[in-house]
């Protein structure tokens, strides 16, 4: 049985990412989650806080028809939080006050600042969604995340604050993935090699992958020992609907590789991370 | 005097980035370098090891006419190192043995493995460049980086091994940037605020930016204090050809913001990172 693997793309938004002020650990965290749920993260595009660049990146992503398009950041109350207005402009859907989002926001501000709190325009902005969007609850922050379906792609605008992004992803996106492709899981193994250069390893990888085409094998150089020999991590990965088959296939592939390396390199299994 | 700021894009290549096995610190390091040299990193696109996806990302980037397009990764000897063949296919330029690159490679293998070493096909692959490319020396690794100019964009394929990537960037790319826009520098300052919500800060940022439009101000939520008040970092940034003018403008902008926040938030200057 072939289970559909949902395809994701991410558009990460923010000058801070492109001037190197912030390391994008959000996309990395999402990559781990998406992948471990058996879905595929196909591409990440990082752009500045500019309407035409955000719109362009969203448009390019939609033209590739992913199942999910996540945007990251630019949802707050300040002048440079322009993700929703960029989306609205690009999709030609007006920004309208979403009543459910408004109620969520109103409750949150009341809880935090008491009954005197005013819902100023910058605050109300966070409840103005592109027409047709529905709010996903934000368990830890002030504003919910808009979710809308465009030409078969589910678009979700996630906040850039890591705690809020993670809570919304776990609370709302994970269940969507599980409904689509929950049977599909990945299995991985790594070998740590010493004393064989990557260029000599390359033909062996080709041989093993020819015998086990379902297993993806990739070598990662990990520096040089004091004696000049290379350290390499050899990473094996298989995904499939049957855990038993996948695990068996992975075990046989690793064993075949070990036998091919006997006498040619120092080999040990990496501890599971 | 207006100094041209060179525009960069990066295409980062590798399944390991999109399954979350590797955090892309290379792009982050490059973002810091590019930015501190007064150039602009406009976009980072991260794609898998697939020829059509790499070619597509390169094509999209070239259509936006950056001054520099850096690719990251996929230059090694193994089957999944397909950056140069993807580039070659997309640009319709044949892969040809570059004699200068070949000599570099030959010397390196000789130094590392002695006179018996064989230049096998996987090794020779690293000297096969798209026609018209020239090699940039790799001070710490085996293979040089191909550099070619396509429709006004200087394309440079950098290796994914951080030490090699950094050495080639510093040795060859930094001098290119300095020739183009060496006078342009950025100046930054951060204030750390407590006790004011981002939504109340937003109108003040607008007021200050209206008076000092050259300074870009961005607020970053940094969590919540135990008493429920928000912690916010307020980041100021200005770039320009005259260091004195930029620094003066930055100082006045920060002072104006501090005066507007007096009595409304706890404010302190962040230490320089």
Image (spheres, coloured by chain):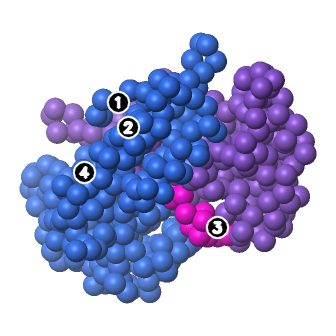
Chain colours: A blue, B purple
Q: How many marks?
A: 4
In the rendered structure, which disc, 4 or 2, sits on the residue that comes first in sequence?
2
Q: Is residue A89 above or below residue B14?
A: below
- Pointer 3: residues within 10 angstroms few (<14), some, or many (20+)? many
Q: Is residue B119 above or below residue B75?
A: above
User: Gap between marks 1 and 3, in whole Å?
Assistant: 35 Å
Is residue B57 a member of the stretch shown in magenta? yes
Q: Which residue is mark 1?
A: A269
Q: Tell me the mark number nearer the camera, choosing from 1 and 3.
A: 1
Say which chain tag 2 marks: A
- Pointer 2: residues within 10 angstroms few (<14), some, or many (20+)? many
The answer to whether the residues at label 1 and label 3 have Cβ atoms under 8 Å apart is no
Q: Quadrant of residue A153?
A: bottom left
- Left or right for B99, reference B13: right
Residue at 85% in and 52% down? B97
Q: Which residue is mark 3?
A: B55
Q: Are marks 4 and 1 in one subunit?
A: yes
Q: Residue furthest top?
A: A226
């Amino acid at each position: 049985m072939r289970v559909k693997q949902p395809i994701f793309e991410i558009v990460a938004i923010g000058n801070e990412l492109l001037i190197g002020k912030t390391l994008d650990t959000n996309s990395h965290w999402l990559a781990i989650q998406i992948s471990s749920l058996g879905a595929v993260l196909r591409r990440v595009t990082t752009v500045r806080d500019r309407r035409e660049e955000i719109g362009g990146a969203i448009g390019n992503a939609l033209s590739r028809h992913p199942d999910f398009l996540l945007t990251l950041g630019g949802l707050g109350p300040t002048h440079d939080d322009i993700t929703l207005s960029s989306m609205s402009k690009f999709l030609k859907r007006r920004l309208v006050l979403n009543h459910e989002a408004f109620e969520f926001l109103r409750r949150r501000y009341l809880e935090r600042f008491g009954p005197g709190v005013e819902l100023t325009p910058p605050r109300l902005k966070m409840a103005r969604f592109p027409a047709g969007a529905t709010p996903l609850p934000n368990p830890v922050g002030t504003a919910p995340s808009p979710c809308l379906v465009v030409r078969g792609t589910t678009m979700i605008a996630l906040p850039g604050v890591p705690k809020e992004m993670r809570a919304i992803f776990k609370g709302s996106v994970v269940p969507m993935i599980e409904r689509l492709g929950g049977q599909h899981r990945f299995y991985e193994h790594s070998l740590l090699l010493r004393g064989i250069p990557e260029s000599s390893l390359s033909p062996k990888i080709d041989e093993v992958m020819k015998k086990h085409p379902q297993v993806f094998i990739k070598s990662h150089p990990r520096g040089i020992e004091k004696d000049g020999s290379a350290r390499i991590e050899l990473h094996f990965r298989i995904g499939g609907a049957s855990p038993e088959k996948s695990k068996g296939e992975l075990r046989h592939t690793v064993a075949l590789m070990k036998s091919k390396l006997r006498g040619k390199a120092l080999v040990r299994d990496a501890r599971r991370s």
